[in-house]
Amino acid sequence: MAKQMVADLQPGQQVDSCFAVIQMQFQPYKDPAKGHFLSVLLGDSTGEISGKLWHGASLIQGIASGDVVKVTAKVEEYRGTKQLNISQLAALPDGELVDLADFLPTCSKGRKALEQELKEALGRFTDPALKSLLTTWFSRPDFWNEYLLAPGAKRVHHAYLGGLAEHSLEVFQLSSTMAKLFPAVNEQLVLAGALIHDVGKMQEYQYKYTIDLTDQGKLLGHIVLGYQMLQREIACHGDFPEEYAEHLGHMILSHHGEMQYGSPVEPQTIEAAVLHQADLASSQIKQYAQTIESGAETERWLYNKTLGRNLYRGFLKEIS
Ligand SMILES: [Fe+2]
Ligand SMILES: [Fe+2]
């Protein structure tokens, strides 16, 4: 049966399809004699929808966040928001295959374009030590594939497959422009930092049907994980200059700019400052773009929780 996508669901519609479980929680009824009901957040590549299974929640076993489940439900509208009144929710029968692309959104640029852009970026390195380090690192097949596949985040910005590569390449281009404006910047070093600053996200997130943090990601975070990955890679290069090793390490550790945003040190070189500003620009401007694109055609104002402000869509041609 064709997959019914979240974005297409309409109030009153009968649903019989597969969705990924993003969150699930058994909640008690006010009357303890009634036991529990199940509250779930389901999703696919087009969006998320919450649902309630009022009866038979005690029979649900062996299902956890990150799984794909088969759902029978009716779409209802509650305070202007669509939600599912679920009559059945079950694990996918053994052997039943689903199309992974149905469940996680993918970078709109497409893998081929990202791959090409990454090859061009790697072609910009002329410094022998940096060129050797990056060429060896990126030509490991596992690293290359995961770098192009990993999401940039769980939520907020670049939260889709290919998001890490897309964001890193934006940071690369922004850093390149800033390096040209300020001759004091070592452009080769800042470009290297741009490409690898978030590699820790490859270990921070798991991404099959949903994007979630790994245990390592929760315990260490992508800044420390990325720093460790860099150290391991440098250890394979016996003659990598010590000064570059320290500087690249500092750039990874300081790229969030301030300790309150997860960096153990603040940027203390001009290259680290450029990388931090480029990272901030890519992540913030992407939030504006994603919020504006997510609005319905007639919506003029949209609130962005992370930015903590309303964004205005009134100047867009289609609604003016
Ligand atoms: Fe980061
Ligand atoms: Fe970043």
Image (cartoon, rainbow, N blue to C red):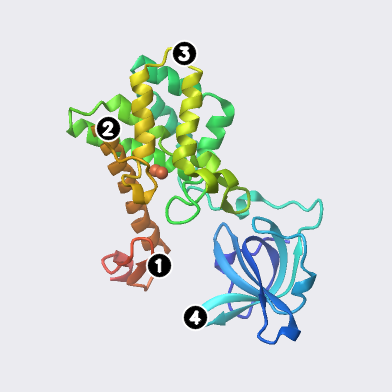
Question: Mark 2 = which residue?
Answer: 271
Residue placed farthest to the top in the image?
239
Q: Nearer the viewer, residue 230 or 12?
A: 230
Name the residue that disc number 1 marks: 295
Cα separation between marks 4 and 2: 48 Å
Please give the residue where the numbered disc 3 appears in the rendered image.
238
**Image depth: mark 4 or mark 3 in front:** 3
In the image, taking residue 37 as reference, residue 181 lies left or right, namely: left
Q: Residues within 10 Å of mark 1 (few under 14, many from 20)?
A: few
Mark 4 / mark 1, whichever is N-terminal: 4
Q: CA distance from mark 1 to mark 2?
A: 37 Å
Tell me the distance, in whole angstroms, between the alpha carbons under discs 4 and 3. Answer: 61 Å
Q: Quadrant of the C terminus?
A: bottom left
Q: CA distance from mark 3 to mark 2?
A: 24 Å
Cβ of mark 2 under 8 Å from ligand 2: the answer is no
Q: Residue furthest bottom?
A: 31
Image point (68%, 56%), residue name = 67
How many residues crowd mark 3 within 10 Å: few (<14), some (14–19), many (20+)? Answer: few
The image position of residue 250, as x and y in percent, is 35, 32
